[in-house]
Amino acid sequence: MKRFNPDAMGEKLLRRFAGGTSRRGILARMGAALVAAPVFPLLPVSRAEAAKPDRSPEAKTEFARSAQTTDQTKCNYWRYCAIDGALCTCCGGGIHTCPAGAEPSPVSWVGSCINPDDGKAYMIAYRDCCGKPACGQCNCDNIDRETQLYLPQLNNNIIWCFGTSSMEYHCSTAMMIGAA
């Protein structure tokens, strides 16, 4: 019983600690902790639970409230939330394929569209098909979440035929990239 003396153990521990450190060293560590403490909230932390998007009908844009999932030839098809131009589905192509004779642009703009069937947002890459005269059918100008022109990768007002053999615009496709 005499071997287990908490006072003696505490004194021995504190004396060993005091013998191995200096006052300046402890003050330096405390100062570093005080300087570093405000940085901790800036560290990357997963806030997926805290930032759940509001999918209520009141929070949806006008396009998202009227979007449908059945007819790909209509401007209110859910993937077309940020498309601008003729739909390739009306011009002999598909929702993500160019018609025969048209060349897909290697660059695209993107949008985040909500599928009304599952309520989830998906990233959509819009790609212009180039090299043929303009189709002129099913012209849509959806500006849901359109950004300013100084963010060109998200703006649909540009003819995206860069890198093709011809800058002549024909129609636009909407390929789903994945969940947003």
Image (spheres, helix red, strand yellow):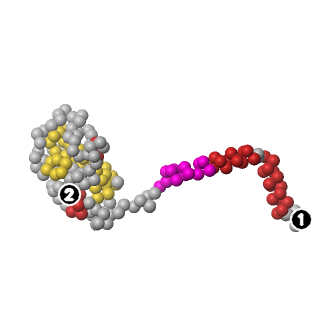
* Segment colored magenta: 34-46
Q: Most prominent secondary structure in the magenta stretch?
A: helix
Q: Which amino acid does label 1 sit on?
A: Lys
Q: Which mark is residue 169?
A: none
Quadrant of the rendering where the C terminus is positioned: bottom left
Cα distance between the residues tagged 1 and 2: 83 Å
Queried whether the magenta region covers residue 130, the answer comes back as no
Q: Which amino acid does label 2 sit on?
A: Tyr
Q: In this image, 176 relative to 53: left or right?
A: left
Residue 97 appearing in the image: no
Residue at x 54% of width, y 49% of height? 39
**Which residue is disc 1 drawn over?**
2
Q: Residue visible at 73% across and 44% down?
A: 24
Residue 167 placement (x, y as % from top left): 17, 35
Q: Nearer the viewer, residue 131 or 21?
A: 21
Q: Residue at x 76, y 45 (%)?
A: 22
Taking the magenta stretch, the answer to whether it contains residue 35 is yes
**Where's the N terminus, which quadrant?**
bottom right
Name the residue that disc number 2 marks. 77
